Image (cartoon, rainbow, N blue to C red):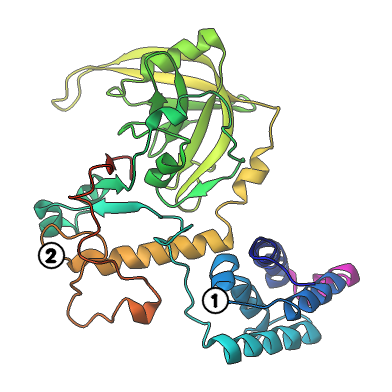
Amino acid sequence: MGLDQYGLRCESRYIRDILAPLVASSGGSILNEATIYTLDALYFDLRATSMSLEMLRFSRIEKALMVIAKDGSDWPHQTVVQAEELIQQWEDKLGPLTNLRADLWGVGGRLEGIRKIRSWRDGLRDRDEEIEEKSSWSIEGLVDPSRAYVTGHLGFEIGSWWIKPAAAFRDGIIDNTTHGITTDRKEAYAVVITDNREFGTRKPGVIGYRASPKDPGVTKLMRTLITRNPVRVLRTAKLVSTWAPAAGVRYDGLHRVVSYGVHLAPAHNGVEETMTYSFELERSQSQHSMTKAMIHPTADEMDDWKDYQFARAMSRGDDVLSLLFGERLEEGVTTYEEHGLRKLSSDSGYFSRRTSRQSSSGV
């Protein structure tokens, strides 16, 4: 019986995220008889699967087999042989698979509908990381921020992961705030924690959150102490914390405000005195633990992150008012197609599509 793309992705993650680290640290002898039997059963199912490039791009199962079959592999010999045979079979049918990449901007891709808008100044100063961070993002189609103005998980699983906050906004777990707190006129519903905004509390299950003094959602987050409604907490890779994801943005579950403090920071180095706001957020126990969240980003999610970083680097030489993946390439740089990346046309509809909505929530 063959496997569908979702089953293939599960098997790929099993090999790359669970088995591969064990074999790398302890050798192939760590795999018991039951595990070998499971891999043999998987190989049987893979032979029965009519594989396509689309299924491989989605699942990354070929990358899982390449981990097993790589030179110097410590995996059991017969397991390696079967992986090599399947890779050869697929390459005979579909062509070379080494540089196969997912279409991040295609239908179902992690960045579907998301485009970066760059100005004249961005084009001149795009090597400045600080300027790069403040660039705007366009979400194709009419995106309603109010989808995020609901308490609870909203159907998102613990560990849900995105390359950019703009993608999380597109999917509806947060709104398009330029700060950190998702809120309407009544209450706060989500918090995106980044940079140095998390601090320890020495209380089990409780984290500290230092809100931006410019965040208009601060008072609404305070109000949840009274309503006792939890907020969704997302962390970014730029967060200075042991809980931060290795890349991108991750949903870490529901937390409830149990206390907050307001402090006046004295003037320092010419900066006027300002109010600072700190919150203690207790993680709800009636949900999956952080162990489930910390699995993410998985190996295939990291594949997409690396592809995005590569694509981002490739866009550094674009012309004035160009968009990510514009028509121009820097001298000496190979084509997008050689790297398996989909090239966008020069007119992606950012300036003509009236239903597009800009979001500055990218980090």
Q: Amino acid at mark 1?
A: Leu
Position of 38 relative to 179 (above/below): below
Position of 40 relative to 169 (above/below): below
Residue 239 appearing in the image: no
Position of 337 relative to 8 (above/below): below
Mark 1 or 2 closer to N-term? 1
Determine whether the residue tagged by mark 2 lies in a helix, strand or loop: loop
Give the residue drawn at x 53%, y 59%.
301
Judged left or right of residue 17, residue 144 is: left
The residue that label 2 is drawn on is 319
Quadrant where the image shows the N terminus: bottom right
Where residue 204 sits, quadrant-wise, is top right
Determine whether the residue tagged by mark 1 lies in a helix, strand or loop: helix
Residue 132, horizontal then vertical, whole percent: 23, 51
Give the residue drawn at x 46%, y 30%.
148
Give the residue drawn at x 20%, y 49%.
131
Q: Say which mark, if any, is on residue 292.
A: none
- Range shown magenta: 26-35
Front one among 303 and 266: 303
Q: Residues within 10 Å of mark 1 (few under 14, many from 20)?
A: some
Where residue 22 sits, quadrant-wise, is bottom right
The residue that label 1 is drawn on is 53
